[in-house]
Amino acid sequence: MNIRENIPLSTLTTMRLGGPARYVAEIADKDDIKKAYAFASEKNLPTWIMGAGANTIGKDAGFRGVILLNKIRGTEIIKESPDELILKGMGGEIWDDFVAFACQKGYSGIEALSGIPGTLGAAPVQNIGAYGQEISQVITEVEAYDTHERRFVTIKARDMKMKYRETIFNHGPDAGRYFIVSVTVRLKKGTLAPPFYRSLQSYIDEHGETDFSPENIRRMVLIIRAAKLPDPSEEPSAGSFLKNVTLKSPAAIAAAKENGYPTYQKPDGSTIINSGWLIEQAGLKGQTFHGFRVSDKAALILINDSAKSYTDLSAARNEIKKTIKDKFGYELAQEPVEIGDKNED
Ligand code: EPU
């Protein structure tokens, strides 16, 4: 196990913020997981699990404990039949490589999740979703290291309590408890059917697309994302910085529709308002707050142009949230997690 000392969180996260982490341990296999937790408990230090840092914000004080970087690699076909593919990937695999492999083989279930930055191990933690798909729809189980019981366990999909960007892994009493070793998904032969998520449907209509095969959906999603979402290696960001608003009651849904706000009913039946639309209507697109710029292409994305400190981020967030609250009455919530925080909002 490779352990480095005093590594700035700004170099480990795509938003490029944050002071030093006391230790950073690179986890290459299951044995390293045990060693890293033993190392932390020997020194009585807290731990924090990270993949590619694409959905994680570092704070100015850094992290006084041990960051565990999941670098466990490998993908394995568990079952392949004419109807389905059961695919298992290790947590340190790059998510998009896993998607590309599934699409090439012609199985459907994660093609709309093409182009999402980050690792496979991080995907179930926040139940990644895009263009109408969520990993919750295809995940069957994960293998994880249970840091409380200090043993490897299998967690079945039904026990993950997956909701919009929320699971047992990032929310509630077990947040941060499990180090995800591998993720297994069940994919089906076949193609998605319209209607698609609004922005994907617009692309399909505009270009007269009729092929909805996994490979072609992947191709379209990659084009849409490239046109809208900043590449974190060029413009630092943490993907969507704010969440869409989940409307909790029929009355709230009716009120939003009456006001003409764009709503979307997700496959799980819940309804969201596109917060990007609210931000755009409030005139915030392209505006700069304390060194952060609201993307002029996708309003949920906050780009770090010149900020060096979490204090700036906090000030920018408060101003954007207040504008939306004052104008529309909705309380927007931050999407990325913060190192040292259990992400319980
Ligand atoms: N919209 C606007 N203005 C904007 C952005 C969006 O009016 O600047 C409205 C439009 O009506 C548009 C709709 O919102 O049709 C949807 O926009 P988009 O497809 O860009 O997606 P999103 O709802 O803004 C979510 C996810 C993204 C994911 C996309 C695609 C969240 C927090 N974000 O954004 O995920 O890629 O859908 O499905 O749910 C991420 O989580 O980091 C992320 C990038």
Image (cartoon, rainbow, N blue to C red):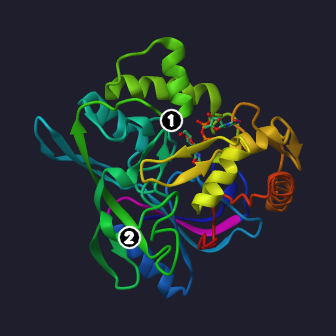
Q: Looking at numbered disc 1 in the image, what kind of residue is underneath it?
A: Tyr
Q: Residue at x 84, y 54 (%)?
A: 316
- Tell which of 257 and 308 is nearer to you: 257
Q: Residue at x 75, y 44 (%)?
A: 278
User: What is the CA distance from the residue labelled 2 to the residue labelled 1?
Assistant: 39 Å
SS state under label 2: helix
- Tell which of 130 and 312 is nearer to you: 130
Q: Please say if 251 is above or below 342.
A: above
Q: Residues within 10 Å of mark 1 (few under 14, many from 20)?
A: some
Query: Where on the image, by quarter, is ligand 1?
Result: top right
Q: Is residue 28 magenta?
A: yes
Coordinates of residue 21 in the picture (x, y in percent)? 64, 67
Image quarter where the N terminus lies is bottom left
Coordinates of residue 243 in the picture (x, y in percent)? 64, 53
Which numbered disc, 2 or 1, marks the residue that appears first in the sequence? 2
- Tell which of 54 and 83 is nearer to you: 83
Viewer-nearest of discs 2 and 1: 1
SS state under label 1: loop
Q: Residue at x 75, y 58 (%)?
A: 330
Q: Please say if 269 is above or below 159.
A: above
Coordinates of residue 15 in the picture (x, y in percent)? 69, 49
Q: Please say if 71 is above or below 280.
A: below
Q: Which residue is mark 1?
A: 197
Give the left or right position of residue 252, taking residue 106 as reference. right
The answer to which image quadrant residue 18 occupies is bottom right
Q: Looking at numbered disc 2 in the image, what kind of residue is underneath it?
A: Ile
Q: Is mark 1 within 8 Å of ligand 1?
A: yes
> Mark 2 touching mark 1, by CB under 8 A?
no
Which stretch did the figure color magenta? 20-29
Q: Residues within 10 Å of mark 2 (few under 14, many from 20)?
A: many
Residue 33 is marked as: 2
